[in-house]
Image (cartoon, rainbow, N blue to C red):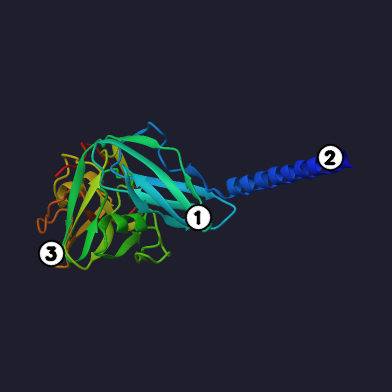
Amino acid sequence: MKREKMKREKERITLSLVVLTVLFGLILTVQADTTPTITFESPTPADGATVDLDHINVTASVTTSSNVSDVLRNWNGENSTMEHISSGTWSLPMTDLTNGDYTFKTYANDTEGNMGESETRTVTVNVTGGSYTIQLPELYSIIALPRDDFSVANASTLATKIGDNCTGIVKWDSETQKYISYVPGVPVNNFAVTDGEGYFVNVDNPTSVVFTGAGFESPCTVSLATDYNILSLPVNDPSVVNASTLATEIGDKCTGIVKWDSATQKYISYVPGVPVNNFAVTGGEGYFVKVDNPTSVVFTGEAWSN
């Protein structure tokens, strides 16, 4: 009887231990499932990469069975809150970087109090090519890309480059002979920004804009549609210094060149062969040119520099 009782007690203890083991395993599984997992996504540079830009975008996806409360980017030991850009994805750029080595990683916290940590990456910034600064007075100017700045691809990124003073960017569509307007923060008409074109930009206060990158490839060909185009010089062609030499470079199809004077907020017109208003032509500016037939113009020279 006593032996039987001891046997049942032993079986009960064994069963209790099995139940506790299972429960403990389940608890560990739940905890493992809810710990956020972080994966770096493009355009985040790979570990050990060298980039020739002065800006880096850190983008990460977070996977968790719970809800994410916040995601932090740790850049050289300093934490900053990342922006939620899409489902499960957070991003935050680091701008105005100087040459050197930088280390970064990300943390993710969920609403259950769990924290995940990404791998640590190191990247080297080695900006090549130099920079070009454009001074913008208040109101409208026509500007152009003086260098191949990879941070500027469209109207929204150009507005970001200009900063909070930018209130609008306007493209002249040479095919339709109409304006296309973009307002910062409004997801409409976010047209591409390319070399060889000029764009109206409006700022509510005087502003300096620095474009960083290598010079555009030389020789560079710019295509012109019949009637008006806003053309810019993508490279510093020594044969083009003013309106008359620009007209000569374009050829006999050119019937007029117009400069927007941002200081006076007025147009200045030059007619080929007429020795009036032969204004200077330089980098970082756009000019209306009129041609009576489609044509192409080739510019050869070095990268623009101040």
Judge the density around disc 1: few (<14), some (14-19), many (≥20) Cα neighbours within 10 Å: few
Task: Identify residue type, mark 3.
Answer: Ala
> Of the residues shown, which amino acid type is indicated by label 2?
Lys
Tag on residue 279?
Answer: none
Residue 4 visible (yes or no): yes
Q: Position of residue 120 (x, y in %)?
A: 41, 37
Q: Which residue is mark 1?
A: 113
Q: Is residue 289 visible?
A: no
Could you tell me how far apart the alpha carbons at marks 1 and 2 are, in whole angstroms?
44 Å
Residue tagged by mark 2?
7
Residue at mark 3: 263
Indicate which label's residue lies in the foreground, 3 or 2. Answer: 2
Q: From this viewpoint, which residue is outermost toward the right? A: 1
Q: Label 3 vs label 2: CA separation?
A: 100 Å
**Quarter of the image where the N terminus is located:** top right
Label 1 sits on a secondary structure element that is loop
Q: Nearer the viewer, mark 3 or mark 1?
A: 1
Comparing labels 1 and 2, the label whose residue is closer to the camera: 2
Q: Residues within 10 Å of mark 3 (few under 14, many from 20)?
A: few
The image position of residue 125, as x and y in percent, is 29, 36
Structural distance between the alpha carbons of marks 3 and 1: 57 Å
**Which one is in front, 128 or 235?**
128
Q: Is residue 279 above or below residue 248?
A: below
